[in-house]
Amino acid sequence: TLLQRDYSFLRDINIWHPFVTVGVYSSTLSAAMSNLIGASRILYALARDDLFGKVLSPAKRTSHSGNPWVSVLISWFVVQLVLFAGKLNTIASIVTIFFLLVYAAVDLACLALEWASAPNFRPTFRYFTWHTCVLGIIGCAVMMFLINAIYASASIAFMLLLLLLIHYLSPTSSWGYISQALIFHQVRKYLLMLDVRKDHVKFWRPQVLLMVSNPRSNVGLITFINDIKKSGLYVLGHVQLGDLDTLPSDPLQAQYDSWLSLVDHLNIKAFVNLTLADSVRHGVQHLLFISGLGGMRPNTLVLGFYDDCLPKDNLIDPYMSFSQSADPLSPPGQMEQPVPFHFASLRGSCDRQDYGESGDGKVLGPQEYVAIIADAMKMLKNVVLARHFQDFDRAQVLSPPSSSPGKGAVFVDVWPVNLLRPDSCSYVDTCSLFLLQLACILNMVRAWRKATLRLFLCVEEGRSVRGSEQKLGQLLRDLRIKAYVYPVPWDQVVALHWQRQGSWSKKQQDPDATATRAEEEEEEENEDDYVNSFPSNATRLSDDYLSAVNKLVLDQARPPPAVRFLYLPRPPADTRRYTSYLHQLELLTQGMGPTLLIHGVTPVITTDL
């Protein structure tokens, strides 16, 4: 009762009463001046570091001697506002709660550093453990609410508001973030718990390694693959040709920040892996071997198609700063284009998305390109070849004008049959199911949810069209995939193939034909261009057949789809036929628009619960 009602009791029991009055004034002035100066210095430091953006910019002003007089005035003004509370006990409660909150925050920071196992956190307090941190936090919190629960709650809310302001307004700093240390510690722990031996097809998801040669011309493909990854691992891979023995330092270190800036600029969720190798093929092998950690490793390799399309700079942004710089590796006569300064160092050593032309020679030839596909399949990686994505604009594709055919609808076409094997019409092999799975995953993405899946069923005369359609429809229902099935007669197309096969077989059976030896050799050489060899069955395909298949696919696209999914056959076992294999794929997909050629090697679908 005495302490609560009589604040001057010390004066009554003191030897000389004025001693207490003098002491009260002296301590008050000393504490006020020290706190005013200390608070103004803190305010000046906050303004100088731009922690709250431009809000505190006036507090940066100082005198000639370096004293922050504006900060002192602002601090004094805030103190005067607090004094309007009119009650010293109220102010004392608020100040005490703020001090306790500061102590609790310091304890929380120490606790976070201890839990993060940061090697450079070495406290000198002899009895420091995480238990003392927790005890300090609990003690401060309890005392805050015992003093005044309302003020304690308000102070905590005010602290959280300051944290949000700092998070959104402060610039990037080099002080280090405790959150990064905590994230690293937790990610490492959970990666160790992610056991690859416990993988199951029910929880399969695509984990993609996208090979990018020139990121400036691959923006459309990069953003599209970001949609198809379905919360899986997404890695942008790049191979730079060179030999570290002949270089003074690693040239990739200077490029890494620019690649991360590209990821931020495109707003995608991806990692970046760069490697130095003597050839693109060896570089891709390196990335397939080493990308990822533990159970998070790429299971799907995505490559741009090998063609002669000229690159287009898709990183031009009119709202960014530019620097006019000509690319010495650009094709002759190509216009100089402005380059955003953030990505100037990303100008690739080649202009083709498939590591094609570079200056006066080719970095990657068709033989090596197909060899990369074969290597990936040997390593049990799914392979996707992306063609005609150089002009792909995601925003434009997903928002077509209502006046266009289809009245603004978006379609995704799926051809789950191997169009290069007319004698094979299976829709339930591993590759076909993988192709269906990727199309379904794309349709599950929020931006693509309104797209319509169109599944084309190739049928021949004499077979039950209704039966095949019902069987495929039942498969889609079992797999819970919503798609519309369209039967496509292709008897005339298949006839072209068997007609070519018959003439070739007849020639093989009649070696005493009337043609001269020179004509035979020339004909055999031309025949080899159409060969597509498989491990179990060799098939010869003519350009007429491939052009007919191409026309068949294009004729069914009414209205045209946003993207097509086609079956990608295995490369031939004979490496001499790699060039003809690539030629067949080029004829098959000519003029189709954005197209994915897909080959799956692992089961990804199950109907088991």
Image (spheres, rainbow, N blue to C red):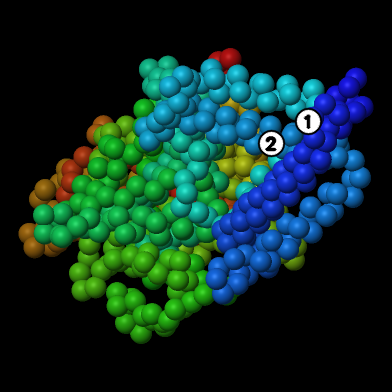
Q: CA distance from mark 2 to mark 1?
A: 34 Å
Identify the residue shown where x is 44% and y is 54%. Answer: 260
Which image quarter holds the N terminus? top right
CB contact under 8 Å: marks 2 and 1: no
* Label 1 sits on residue: 15
Q: Nearer the viewer, residue 501 or 532?
A: 532
Residue furthest front as drawn: 15
Q: Within 10 angstroms of label 1, few (less than 14), some, or many (20 or more) residues? A: few
Residue 125: give x, y in percent of width and height: 45, 26
- Is residue 50 found left or right of 336 in the rendered image? right
Query: Which picture quadrant has residue 294?
Result: top left
Which image quarter holds the C terminus? top right
Q: Nearer the viewer, residue 152 or 262?
A: 152
Residue 82: give x, y in percent of width and height: 83, 49
- Is residue 220 found left or right of 100 in the rendered image? left
Q: Amino acid at mark 2?
A: Phe
Q: Nearer the viewer, residue 206 or 60?
A: 60
